[in-house]
Image: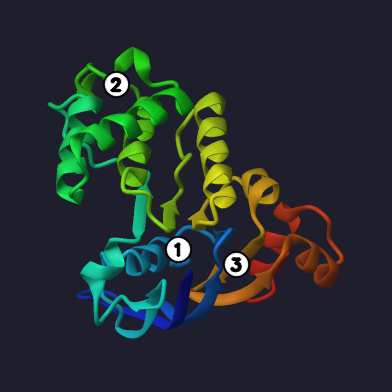
């Protein structure tokens, strides 16, 4: 389970001064639940997800991953987290096979087990044709698939995904959405940000809409429709943001 409690993040910029990127944000993503995090560019989505993944330290508040406090025990929390963003951050001189073996070693996974996991992802994500091709020769979609395999290699209980389908073609995006659905069926907690509303509408159990780092609307799509009187998620999002601006 993933639980955020009054998360805030302040940046100090020489020109702009104090910037409150995330403001007192609280929510919960239960096991077997997919939560969509929606917001305009600059709304605080990436900052929120990076704090949850222990990559940024909150200015105030904290979060819990399977009841492990990310501030008190960040290394323990990381054991249960898989984090992915649009920036794959892969070593371009390695192949996908070498990448998975390397990260398997870092996670302390026996090589036979990491090879087995690679086989599973190669089939699910259609990666077999380029497992031994250097990363810098791969397309954006192929790199993202490798990054997802790396992220899920240690079978994390919580997946934190920052626009995982950004820039991908429709087939690659569909594969990743299917993988997110599989994670749900395995009782994982999944939170991801996206600008693609039909993705969120299709797979999310719960939606969080933020603006200016603040939570402005939360609930299932059915609840959001009932509260707003609007059926389409795009229109619900626009209406929610305009109401606070």
* Residue occupying image coordinates x 32% and y 30%: 116
Q: CA distance from mark 1 to mark 2?
A: 28 Å
* Residue occupying image coordinates x 69% and y 74%: 243
**Which color mode does the image show?**
rainbow
The residue pinned by badge 1 equals 45
Tell me the SS state at disc 1.
helix
Tell me where residue 57 appears, x and y as whole percent. Answer: 26, 75
The residue pinned by badge 3 equals 209
Q: Residues within 10 Å of mark 2 (few under 14, many from 20)?
A: some
Dot placed on the residue nearer the N-terminal end, 1 or 2: 1
- 77 or 23, which lies in front? 77
Q: Residues within 10 Å of mark 3 (few under 14, many from 20)?
A: many
Vertically, is 200 above or below 56?
Answer: above
The answer to whether 180 appears left or right of 52 in the picture is right
Callouts 3 and 1 close, C-beta under 8 Å: no
The answer to whether 207 appears left or right of 124 in the picture is right
Q: How many marks?
A: 3
Tell me where residue 108 appears, x and y as whole percent. Answer: 17, 49
Tell me where residue 27 appears, x and y as whole percent. Answer: 54, 76
- 20 or 142, which lies in front? 142
Q: Nearer the viewer, mark 2 or mark 3?
A: 2
Dot placed on the residue nearer the N-terminal end, 3 or 1: 1
Which circle marks residue 138 in the picture?
2
Residue 21 visible? The answer is no
Location of the C terminus (image quadrant)? bottom right
Callouts 2 and 3 close, C-beta under 8 Å: no
Q: CA distance from mark 2 to mark 3?
A: 34 Å
Vertically, is 30 above or below 125?
Answer: below
């Amino acid at each position: 389970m993933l639980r955020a409690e009054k998360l805030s993040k302040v940046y100090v910029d020489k020109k702009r001064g104090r910037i409150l990127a995330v403001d007192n944000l609280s929510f919960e993503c239960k096991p077997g639940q997919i939560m969509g995090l929606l917001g305009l560019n600059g709304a605080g989505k990436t900052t929120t997800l990076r704090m949850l993944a222990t990559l940024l330290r909150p200015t105030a508040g904290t979060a819990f991953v399977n009841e492990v406090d990310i501030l008190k025990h960040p290394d323990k929390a990381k054991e249960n987290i898989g984090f992915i963003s649009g920036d794959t951050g892969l070593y371009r001189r390695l192949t996908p096979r070498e990448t998975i073996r390397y990260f398997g070693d870092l996670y302390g996974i026996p090589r036979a087990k990491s090879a087995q996991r690679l086989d599973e992802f190669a089939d699910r994500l259609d990666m077999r044709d380029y497992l031994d091709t250097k990363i810098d020769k791969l397309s954006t979609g192929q790199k993202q698939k490798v990054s997802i395999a790396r992220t899920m290699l240690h079978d994390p209980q919580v997946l934190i995904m920052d626009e995982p389908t950004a820039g991908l073609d429709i087939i690659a995006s569909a594969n990743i959405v299917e993988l997110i659905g599989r994670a749900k069926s395995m009782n994982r907690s999944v939170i991801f940000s996206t600008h693609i509303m039909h993705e969120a509408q299709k797979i999310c159990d719960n939606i969080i809409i933020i603006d200016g780092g603040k939570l402005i609307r939360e609930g299932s799509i059915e609840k959001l429709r009932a509260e707003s009187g609007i059926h389409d998620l795009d229109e619900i999002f626009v209406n929610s943001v305009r109401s606070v601006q």
